[in-house]
Image (tube, rainbow, N blue to C red):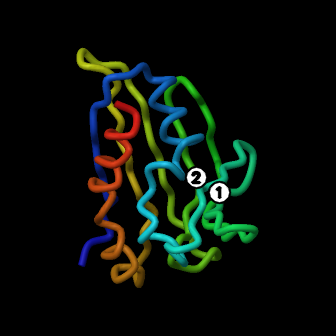
Amino acid sequence: MSLDPVVAEVTVPVTPTEAFVGFTAQMGEWWDPLLTPDPATFTGIAIDPHGDVAMVHGDEQYVWGRVTEWDPIGRYSQEFWLGHAEESPTTLVVTFTEGPDGTEVRLEHSGWTPGSEEVRARYTDWARLLERYAAHVS
């Protein structure tokens, strides 16, 4: 099993800033509810640009990350521990680069350490999530 970063890319027909807003502020609108603790009660994702990232289920929030970089014209990153221990976070970095056909969005999920191979194997669905994101912002 690999410890290489999981990488997914998509191009969306909007500006980098619009792509950033669609990825961050609107994440709860395109995130797959099946990838939450309780799909039936999922109501969104809350992101504090200076703090926590959390799944929202009614009045409950499940923190699964912490923002480490917030640059609306090009880059978003966070510590990530959805489905694994907060003490061993991985890193999610998303870049938004203007291209000839819109904005090229590149997601890299890295920071896998020896012993986390089975956890990493559960995070190979980023391409499908980015397809949902692209449909949302297009």
73 over 134 or under it: above or below: above
Q: Is residue 39 positioned above or below 93 on the image? A: below
Amino acid type for the residue under numbered disc 2? Gln
The quarter of the image holding the C terminus is top left
The numbered disc on residue 23 is none
Per the model, the C-alpha gap separating discs 1 and 2 is 8 Å
Left-right relation of 62 to 33: right
| 53 relative to 105 in the view: left or right | right
Q: Pick the residue in front: 54 or 77.
A: 54
Residue 118 higher or lower than 49, as above or below: below
Earlier residue among tags 1 and 2: 1
Taking the image as shown, residue 67 lies to the left or right of residue 131, namely right
Q: Along the line of sight, which residue is nearer the eye, 47 or 136? A: 136
- Which residue is labeled 1 in the image? 53
Q: Are marks 1 and 2 in contact (CB under 8 Å)?
A: yes
Give the total number of marks visible in the rendering: 2
What residue sits 52% from the left and 74% below the top? 40
In the rendered image, residue 101, in percent from the top left (x then y), is placed at 24, 19
Residue, disc 2: 78
Q: Amino acid at mark 1?
A: Val
Q: Residue at x 62, y 41 (%)?
A: 69
Taking the spot 45% from the left edge, 42% from the top edge, the residue there is: 94
Q: Residues within 10 Å of mark 1 (few under 14, many from 20)?
A: many
Q: Nearer the viewer, residue 6 or 100?
A: 100
Name the residue: 56% across, 70% down: 81
* Image x and y of residue 27, in percent: 52, 48
Element at label 1: strand
Q: Quadrant of residue 121?
A: bottom left
Q: Position of residue 76 (x, y in %)?
A: 54, 40
